[in-house]
Structure formats: C-alpha cells, structure tokens
Amino acid sequence: MATRMMNVNAVLVAITLALLTCGPRCIYSDDQRLLVNMTLVRNASALGAFCLDGSLPAYHLHRGFGGGARNWLLQFEGGGWCNSTKSCLDRANTRRGSTRYMSKWEVFSGILSNNASLNPDFYNWNRVKLRYCDGASFAGDAVYKNGTSLLYFRGQKIWEAIILDLLPKGLGQARKALLSGSSAGGLSSFLHCNNFTKYLPSTASVKCLSDAGFFLDERDISSNHTMRSFVKDVVSLHGVEKNLDENCTASYLNFPELCFFPQYAMKFITPPFFILNSAYDVYQFHHILVPPSADPQGHWNRCKLNPAACNPQQLNALQEFRRGMIVAVGLSYKYSRRGGFFINSCFAHGQSESQDTWFAADSPRVHNRTIAEAVGDWYFNRRATKEIDCPYPCVTTCHNLIP
C-alpha cells in the first residue's frame, strides 16, 4: 500500500511540474505533443528589426525547471534563403518571410522536448525556438526600396532583438547555454556562435551546435560552383558581408562571401562546436551536387527519390561528395579538441527536432550511439564524440527522409 501511494505521489509531482512550467504559453495536444505559443518581440521596431515584409520577429519559449532552470538552449529555425528581389518578395508573402503567416503554436520535440525520456539532457532547460523570417540565416542588414516594393533584410537585427528580449527573462544569468539550429538555422549557429558568448556571463558554459547546416562549397556534377554563386547573391543582396567574421573575411579578401560557408568560417569560431550532419545530406544532394541546372534532362530524378535506384556512376558521385564532407569536417576540427561531430550516412536533412531521429528506440546510430546521446556526451564532457558512419549502403538504422 505504501509503495502504491509513493508511485501515485510521484505521478502527481510530475504532472504538477509539467503544468507549472507550461503555464499559459503552452498546451499539450491530444497525442501529448508539447505546443508552445509565439512571443512577438514588441521592442524590435526600435532596433529596426523586421521580417522581410515589415512584421515583427518572434520566438517560442518554454521555461526550464529544476536543475535546468538557469540553462538555456536557443534553436534557430531553418528554411532556405532568398537571393534575388523577386524570390524575397515572394518569400515575404509566406511564413518564411512574415510572422503574419506563421503558426502561432509550435511543436517542441526532439532537442526541444520537455520529456526526460525523449530528451534526457536538455528536457528541463529553458528552450527557445527563434522563428526565421529574413531569408539570410539571421545575418543580413539592408533595406530594398524601388518606389513600389519594400523589403527588410534585417536578420542581424532580428537576432539582436530576440537576444535583448531574452536577457531579462533569465538568459543574462545563464549557467549553461547551447546555441543550435537546423538547416539554414544550423548555418546561423556558425555565423552567431562567437557573438552569442558576448551576451552571457563570463562564467557560463557556452557551446554551439549545427544540425544540417554544414553546407559545402563544392562543384556540382557539371563542374560549376552553383552554390557559391547562389551564396554570393545572398550575401550581396542582404548586406551580409559586414556581419561575417572579420578575421575570416580578412583571410579571403577577394571572396568574402566564402565566410558564409562553415568550412571556411569554422576555424575562426572560439566556443566548442558540434557538427551534426548527414554525409548524404538531401538538400545538398539536390541543390549543391545535382541542382536542376546541372541535370536539365532529369537523368538523376529516380536516384534523387531513391538511392537504391542510383546507377554506379551516380553512386560514385555521391561517395565523392561524402568524402568531401568528411575532409571538410576533419579540417575544421584540426584546430579544436573541444569540438565534436556526428556524421551519419542517412539520406536526410535535419535530425535534431524530429523525435524519430533525435532519440527513439529505432533512431539512427553510429557505433551504437544515438544523436541525443552523442550531443549530450559532448556537451557535458562525458566522453569524446567524433563519430563518422560507414558509407551507404552499409547502414541499417537510418530514417531516409527524402522529401
């Protein structure tokens, strides 16, 4: 009887804690997913921080509790880039360019989950999702006007406005902090990692993580630098260059846009950094290695949809791309013993916010470690984490999430 009462009390305590930390800013859906409400940054206009269409920037905050009450995890949202006035004007009328079109409630799962069984190391931290609405990985600072159209390229200001809004809410007294992001948001982690430390106490443990953000400067199958050209347009249009690392741009005086690529920027990043990426990243496969411009006849279409349908020549190109990824990651960590990486061989893009890939019974593993375990071991210095998977098709634990 006493044991039964203790179990009941434990359940009541857990429910009470969940309700207290949730409050009016979050709810639980019928399937027990954590939904967190949007917070608009009301003071952003004073800084000139606007989404592409002029709407206010936003974030979603779920409060930490217990031992994690003074720890903070900030997750940049991803969503590609716009590299021309036309593509940015189109983007401004979507959730990628305006908070007016965004969902007001976001599911917090994977690295953002508040469930200890699903997110064992960060479940009780303050967890924040920074909404993405500028089109240049939170790095631009310019305005476009032509008499009839107005676009705000204010990603850098949005970053600053959100941080300033969070500092008095507890971020300014953080003991531990992790700046992370996925896809274009993963690239943001590279671009803002150094700056992030300047806002936090000197005693805080500050580290950074990029999920699917290690975009490569590689030639496509037609030997063209398609991605480099695209990035150059983004950097120029959005006024990004002045916000890139000065030491990096000084090293590439004639090509400052290269510092938008992590493989060139990485050696100038001071805090410990963790790279989570697929060696066969689907976005990079489809847009860097085999962009539509390099395959006008669609010879790669079947291979793109299903790697099992790739012919020997196509598989060889994929393996060469993987080798390029591994070499670039290895060179990045030549200067950092405190860094870590988890490079698996899944045909996926973004694995930290999906519960299936972050931490589940059938999650992808490298050397029998899940992504959540690898990241946690690295952050808390439990053991070194520099994991590289065997090449496709040897892997059996992948969720090949080809869109």
Image (cartoon, rainbow, N blue to C red):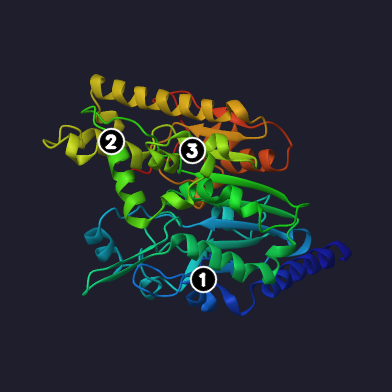
Instruction: Mark 2 vs mark 3: give the one in front.
Output: 3
Give the answer, above or below, for where 244 lies relative to 216: below
Q: What is the three-letter code of the residue carrying label 3? A: Ala
User: In this picture, is 23 found above or below 77?
Assistant: below
Task: Give the residue at the far right of this rendering.
Answer: 2
Q: Which residue was labeled with disc 3?
A: 250
The kind of secondary structure element at disc 3 is: helix
Q: Return the x and y of residue 258 as percentages of the image width and height.
A: 40, 38
Q: Position of residue 16 (x, y in %)?
A: 73, 73
- Front-most of residues 381 and 389: 381
Q: Position of residue 74 (x, y in %)?
A: 59, 57
- Depth check, front residue: 195 or 179: 195
- Indicate which disc residue 102 carries: none
- Mark 2 vs mark 1, CA separation in Å: 34 Å
Q: Which mark is residue 306?
A: 2
Residue drawn at point x = 25 percent, y = 64 percent: 90
Q: Nearer the viewer, residue 110 or 29?
A: 110
Residue highlighted by disc 1: 29
Earlier sequence position, callout 2 versus callout 1: 1
Is residue 40 visible in the rendered image? The answer is no
Residue 255 horizontal side relative to residue 369, left or right: left
Please state which amino acid type lies under the numbered disc 1: Ser
Between 55 and 265, the one lying in front of the other is 265
Residue type at mark 2?
A: Asn
**Pointer 2 with pointer 1, Cβ within 8 A:** no
Quadrant in the picture for residue 149: bottom left
Kindly tell me whether residue 219 is visible in this rendering: yes
Do labels 2 and 3 touch, CB within 8 Å? no
Disc with the residue nearer the chain's start (3 vs 1): 1
User: Vertical placement of 270 versus 112: above or below?
Assistant: above
